[in-house]
Structure formats: structure tokens, C-alpha cells
Amino acid sequence: MSAETDNENEIRTTTPARRAPSSTTPGPGRAGQPASGPSRYRALLRGRNRPVWEEDPNPLGLLVKGAALLLIVATVVYPLYTVVLTSLSTQADITRSGGLVTVPGGLTFAAYEQILSGGIVTRATIVSIGVTVVGTVLSTTVSVLAAYGLSRPGSFAHRPILFVFLITMFFGAGMIPTYLLVSNLGLIDSYWSLILPGAVSAFNVLILRAFFMGIDRSITDAAKIDGAGDWRILGQIVLPMSKAVVAVVALFYGVGYWNAFFNAMLYINDNAKWPLQLVLRSYVLQGVTLPGSGVGQVDVADGAVTGLPVKMAVMVLAIVPILVVYPLVQRHFTKGVIFGAIKG
Amino acid sequence: MTAASSPPGAPPRRRIPWTVRARRDRTLLIMVAPAVLLLAVFAYVPMLGNVVAWQDYSPYVGIRESPFIGWANFARVLTNPLFLDAVANTLVITAVQLVFFFPVPIVLALLLNSVLSPGLRTTIQSIVYLPHFFSWVIVVTIFQQIFGGAGMVATRLREAGYSGFDLMTNPDTFLLLLTAQSVWKDAGWGIIIFLAALATVDPQLYEASVVDGAGRWRRMWHVTLPALRPVIILLLILRLGDALTVGFEQLILQRGAVGTDVAEVLDTFVYYQGVVNGDWAFAAAAGLVKGLVSLALVLGANKLAHLVGEAGVYQRA
């Protein structure tokens, strides 16, 4: 995987090659001229993207493959669909379906109005957004700086500093000493306890570093001759060329902060300061009655849940930010991940 | 700059005194400083904090004042039946996931790679990557709503006259449930690295093998799978190195519902013994044993990869 690849997505780079195999190796003759006989059917079956050398698809195989793909997509999409639908359903529909709603009936935003009109969920959402934004900005900035600082082999103390990062990937200090440290620093019940302990991921630094090192030296050298310092080279040359990989790393950090619940379980005792994921765990997964959720009664005997729309609305609230950011970053995944995996 | 003043690897660079090089590279050092500082405080200080494992530690007295008691905590850990159960559970979960989770992304990648329409393929990729970005709380809650005692499946079964269906609290099917959750969340994301490896296969290899008379399955066996081999081995090494780490967040969410018999793993053991029960030194010793064995496993697995002629996680150079 060369660092010079300009394509957004490695997968796509092979597609033209598949469409037009090199003319020096012609495919088996029959596939070259698909115009005779029941040609329209065969052309349809072959599709436009099938390479010349590949045999005609087997209709049964196509059917099985299509069914498998449909099943896989449905496995992901269907649960999300029912969760969203349930959060929007009226109590009557939920009672009728006896749980998650699968067929749309009466729709209402009542559950969302309820959880977003102040109270625990609203506060937890604000905490989560705050921690995620501050944490992501801090982590991404620190990691980009570190990656640039480590991107020039032969610079002062390059190898020892690199090892400082590498070692953390192979040996973690462990939960107990980390907890004792956070506690000794007086960070219990502080939002910084949700940010600082995991602020730097050596893996992400290495992804960025691998990318920065792949940038053509002649470009940065030219800037240096023109009198630019390292700060300017990073800000005006390296960063604009690395938007994709920085976006992926920022997404990794952001999702990490947004999804974390165990660090809050450890460090945040005051449940007024809980982030959304921990609220989700207590009130939705464990079925503790959500104060002010009105119908949030849980009958422990048969586990029948009546506050379901509220619970599912909290779920949707925890999923939405990911659904919003995901499409913006998703097309850069291959580049970002592969650099880390193969070069790091 | 260095390349301009001296050719790379040439001896003159070595003669630059370190004070001069430090001055020359001071901007780079300043840039690395915040990250190094954060790691020093939150990764390296806790590594030293593991000394509590050799102490009769009390949070009221503190690390400095607590008396050292030698290897007593480790002796307690290694003879504790609950710890040994946690080790066994951890290894069983790792083994089951290795067999039932690990191959799934490979099969999915091969399936997706055979989809020729680029648009369709990109769409499916975007959808199957998505659950990876959901938190474990969300994933477990979704499973609870579908397979739990009050969930969708149980409700339908009750209507049909069967009661008592609840996968979420059944210890006998817990391994199955864990694996299903892992597959739902991460198998889709797992294909990304295999797809990238498949994209690097030279199409001429396929053309040549067709000319030689190879059918679909022989092409897969002799061209496609060999292209995936380095990646598969790399991921196997990483998984083996992580053998003692099994979805901590996933398990701690379900340990209460399913019970400790099947759901207590090393990390949850450390958490409950230390943070919940307050036996800090004992838990630190257990955590340290786990950390050191894990380190040995990664290094060992990597060594093994070198022996069989693969690149491994890091190079020897």
C-alpha cells in the first residue's frame, strides 16, 4: 500500500482494471462477443462490471448470494428500524405489539419531548456532548502534533520517543493503578477523568505518523528552503494534505468518547454528572425507573416494560450523533485504517 | 534538511553533537511533548503504581506508607478458585470467538468482493460497518429488546404458547449470545482490512489462472486466499496477544444478568475485587499477572510468525 495513492478508496482503484482487463491477455473467446443467441438475457446476467475472463454467473449462485447479502443488510437495519419506530410510537401501539413495534401505527414525538425537556437525560446528553467535543479536539490536536514530531527519522531522540508510544500498545498499566492515580489526582467526579486517562492512543498517533511520513519529502523541503518553520509546514502543507486521515482519527477519538461508559462508572460517583451511555445503561438496560418518565414502570416479575418509547428514544439519542458524523467520514475509512494496520 | 546536508545513513550526521541536534529539532520535541506528558502521567505512572501489588495496600495510608509484603498477594491470586474460574472463562470465550467469530469477516469480505457493482458494494459496506460505531450499551440493549425476557422473540413465542424464553439470562447459551453480539457489532468492520488486501490482487493473476483452466473455486483457493494470508496471520497474532482480553464492556454489562459462573472474566474479576470490594492490592496483582501474560503472548505470537516466515506485528529490524 503506497502512501502516494491518491484515490479516496483503495477498493475503487481496482474497478477500472476489472472493467478493462489488459488487452495483452484476451479472455476466453466466448466472453468477448456476448451478442449472439439469447444475448440480451446473458448481457443482463453478466452485468457491466464483470471482467471478460470471468465465466457467466450461475443464476442459482446469484440468487443465493443476493439472499445472503439481503439477510446481512437486514440484520443490521431491521433492529435499528424497530428501535426508531418504537421510540416514535404511541402507547397504544406498543401495548398492542407487546414490545418493539414492527409495523408503523400512530406516530408521536412525545417521548422525545419528555426526555429533552430537562431532567436526567437532557443533562446527560449535554455532558456527553461536552466531553466528546473537548476530548476529541484535545486528543486529535495532541496526536497530530506528536505524529508530526515523530515523522522525521533521524531527528533528536526519535527512536526513544517512538518507543514511549509503542510500549503502551503492548503493556497496559491496568485498571487498579490507573484508578488509584486518577483518585490521587483528585479527578474523581471531574469531567477530566473521562478525558485525560485515555487522551492519547498510540495507535492513532502511528496512523497519522505513517501518513505524514508518506508525504513527499521534496514538498516539505521546498517549504523549508523558502523559510517556513515546522509549525507552518504542519499547518499549511501537511495538514491540508492529510484531511482524510485526520478526519478518520478524529472520528475514532470522538466515537470513543461518546460511547465510553465504564470510565464514568469508575470515576463519576455523582449521577448528576453521568454521561448519556451510563444513563442508558442504568435506566434502559438495567431497568431502573427513570425519574420523571411518567409511564416508566418496570414489572420485575415478567419484565414487561411500559416506558418503552422513552427508553428507545434515549437509545436513538445515543445513536444519532454517530449517524450524523458517520457519512462524512466513512469514505475515508479504507485509507485511514489501512495505513495504521499495514504501515504502523 | 538532513537529506540536503548529508546523504541518509552517511557517517557525517553522527558527528553532529547531540546538543546541536536537540536545538535543531526543538520544534519537533515541543510538538511531541504534550502527548509524551499525557502518556507519562496516565500510562507510565500507573505502571509504577503496580507496586501496590507487593503491598498490604490501604487507601487511607497511601502507596508511600503501606507496608511491603512480598509475593503474598500473587500467592493469593494464583490459588484463588474465583481467579482460576475467571481465567478459564476468559480462555473459553477467546477460543469460541476464534472459531466462530474470526472467520466471519473473511467470508463476508469474499462475498462482498464478488459483488461487481461498485455502487452496490459501497452501500453494503457502509451499512455493515455501522454497528462497529455503536456503544456496547446500545448493542446489548438491542439484543435485550429482541432476545430478552420481555423482548420481541419472547413475546411472539408467548403468543404461540411457549413461555420462559430469555436468552439474556441463560448461562447455557451465553457463549452463543456473546458471539452473536460480537459478530453483529464487529464482523462488518472486520472486513475492511480483508477488502483492502483483496483490492491489491493483480487481476492478471486471475486472467492467467482462467487461461490455465481454473474455475471459480480454484481461483479462490489459489489466488484469492493466498493474497489474504498475511492479513489473516497478522490478525491471528493480534487476537492471540489479546487472548486474555475479552470484551470487557460487553461482559460487565451482562455479568449481573447471567451470573459469574460464565460471565466472570479476568477484567471483570479485577474490577469487582478491586473497585467494588476494595481489595486493591489483590486486584492489582491479578491485573498485573494478566498484563504480563498478555505481553508474553504478543511477543510469543510475533516470534512464531517470524519463524513461519511472516512479517508479524513489528519487524525485527
Image (cartoon, coloured by chain):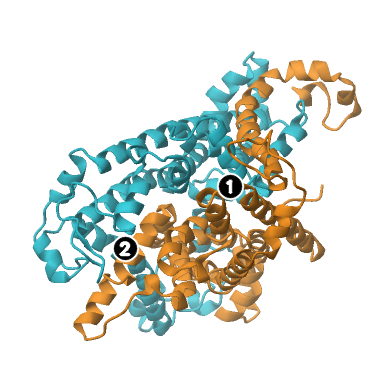
Chain colours: A cyan, B orange
Disc 2 target residue? A77
Q: Amino acid at mark 1?
A: Met
Q: How crowded is the residue under tag 1: few (<14 C-alpha within 10 Å), some, or many (20+)?
A: many
Image quadrant in which you'd find residue B3: top right
The residue type indicated by label 2 comes to Val
Which of the pair A27/B78 is nearer the observer?
A: B78
Residue A88 lies, in percent from the top left, at: 16, 55
Q: Is residue A136 left or right of residue A318?
A: right
Which comes before the other along the chain, label 1 or label 2?
2
- Left or right: residue B55 versus residue A248 is right
Give B155 or B16, whichever is nearer the viewer. B155
Nearest the eye: A67 or B186 = B186
Q: Nearer the viewer, mark 1 or mark 2?
A: 1
Position of the N terminus of chain B by quadrant: top right
**Percent position of residue A102, x then y:** 20, 68
Badge 1 vs badge 2, beta-carbon distance below 8 Å: no
Residue in the image at 47% along x and 58% along y = B252
Q: Residue at x 43, y 69 (%)?
A: B258
The image quarter in which residue A258 lies: top left
Position of residue A305 relative to residue A157, above or below, is below
Q: Chain of mark 2?
A: A
Q: Residue furthest bottom?
A: B161
Q: Quadrant of residue B120?
A: bottom left
**SS of the residue at dot 2?**
helix
Q: Is residue B215 visible?
A: no
Dot 1: element: helix
Q: Which residue is mark 1?
A: A175
